[in-house]
Amino acid sequence: MAAAKDDSAGEDRPWGEVAPEAARRLLIAAVDAFAERGYHATTTRDIAGRAGMSPAALYIHYKTKEELLYRISRIGHEKAVEILRTAAEGEGGAAERLACAVRSFVRWHAGQHTTARVVQYELDALGAESRAEIVTLRRQADAQVRVILDDGVAAGEFDVPDIPGTTLAVLSLCIDVARWFNAAGRRTPDEVGTLYADLVLRMVGAKPAGG
Amino acid sequence: MAAAKDDSAGEDRPWGEVAPEAARRLLIAAVDAFAERGYHATTTRDIAGRAGMSPAALYIHYKTKEELLYRISRIGHEKAVEILRTAAEGEGGAAERLACAVRSFVRWHAGQHTTARVVQYELDALGAESRAEIVTLRRQADAQVRVILDDGVAAGEFDVPDIPGTTLAVLSLCIDVARWFNAAGRRTPDEVGTLYADLVLRMVGAKPAGG
DNA sequence: GAAAGCTCTAAGCGCTTGCTCACCAGCAGG
DNA sequence: CCTGCTGGTGAGCAAGCGCTTAGAGCTTTC
């Protein structure tokens, strides 16, 4: 059980790619605020305040409040697609790749649940153009899981009567982790990932060993 | 497969219990608006407008905008608990009851997805007291599913290593239907309910027939 | 060492928000 | 015909919103 490359959810640090330090601080502040209170309930004053700056400073680095959300959403979705692609293109049987995909995807949604919450639930606060762009990324994520299921069924490893429906369910299950995680706080992201990988293998009727 | 009483998601009409006609119209308008744009992005003028009334009329029937959300959330959660309890207390084996619970819970989340979206995703727009009250209802919903899983494991019908975790996953899967349903619109609530009931039975390792 | 360029701030503009208040139509009871 | 009640309206208030603008401090450039 070490074929499909696993780790990819843990990067150096969450928002390293955001360029000027002040812009990065603002973006992180925005993620926290959006996750905590929602996009519309968050004020630009709140974001700037959390970043230790005046309200006007925000507009030096971002044109609008919405651009902040867009940036967050875009980077987050790219990360999500990357996680799933890494798993889908990994080595090993379909079951291993599916387990790996679910494990790392869930681990990300749990560990970075504040980011994930913004990414997954504030999508329609975006304008039409930005949203369309993000939806494209989302479809790429779907496709990764779909491919694994197709492979598994073709290889006789899985028993899945409804592949599109099951794809949807698997992704849905993983995504919803962002909603409830840390409400109780009893489980680690790793534990949830392992549990969910097991549940999903059962959902697709994976043969316990070798197929 | 007719033991556990099934239907309970379809009532006479959605908000029949809301007393004066104008209050009901306002509440329905609020559900639509909250589901469409989110609680914070919805204005009282928008709600009143959808109900064909002036902004001030809202305050004859509800003290604040938050009270509207509270009323919606309360009634919705009561409905959810009722659906799960009906299934949990039905006759038949654990597998039948679990399938029934998932089927009717999912059918509600899909069919009434606009209500369900408000109920499930706008919870923390509520004040502390209201939220606490709703959280109690939510725990009751959890308990219903938990009981079915306990029964199934005790009877040897299910194979579930982690009962609390699986309970969480089952509910999570059902709830997230409210998020994605009708985005595409290819499936009926019934179809999704049936698919999900099957997936959940696999998750708990239910013996295909008789146990 | 003055000019130019960034980053950031204090102050505030125009607008929208949740909510209120003075008032009014329709309809019962006498 | 007046009275009182219920359920509605139009106008508008105080507060808070996203965002702008004039200018201050600090480097960098020549």
Image (cartoon, coloured by chain):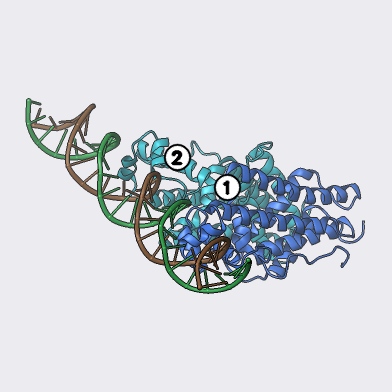
Chain colours: A blue, B cyan, C brown, D green
Residue at (92% x, 59% y) in the render: A210
Residue B207 to residue A3: above or below: above
From the viewer's perspective, is the residue at label 1 or at label 2 nearer? 1
Q: Would you place residue C28 above or below residue A49 in this image?
A: above
Who is closer to the viewer here, D4 or C25?
Answer: C25
Name the one closer to the observer, B114 or A160: B114
- Say which residue label 1 marks: A126
Percent coordinates x, y for residue A19 in the rendering:
65, 63
Is label 1 in a helix, a strand or a loop? Answer: loop
Quadrant of the image for the N terminus of chain A?
Answer: bottom right
Q: Which quadrant: the C terminus of chain A?
A: bottom right
The residues tagged by marks 1 and 2 sit, at their Cα atoms, a distance apart of: 25 Å
Identify the amino acid type marked 2: Ile
Q: Is residue B10 left or right of residue A200?
A: left
What is the secondary structure assignment of the residue under circle 2? helix
Provide the chain ID for the residue under circle 2: B
Residues at marks 1 and 2 on the same chain:
no
Q: Amino acid at mark 1?
A: Leu
Above or below: residue A54 compared with residue B62: below
Classify residue A162 as left or right of residue B56.
Answer: right
Q: Position of residue B191 (x, y in %)?
A: 69, 39
Mark 2 surroundings within 10 Å by alpha-carbon count, few (fewer than 14), some (14 through 19), many (20 or more): many
Q: Which mark is residue A116?
A: none
Q: Compared with residue A99, is residue C26 higher up or lower down, i.e. above or below? A: above
Q: Position of residue B147 (x, y in %)?
A: 62, 60
- Name the chain letter of the residue that bears numbered label 1: A
Residue B24 screen position, x and y as percent: 40, 39
Q: Residues within 10 Å of mark 1 (few under 14, many from 20)?
A: some
How many numbered discs sit on the rendered protein? 2
Mark 2 highlights which residue?
B28
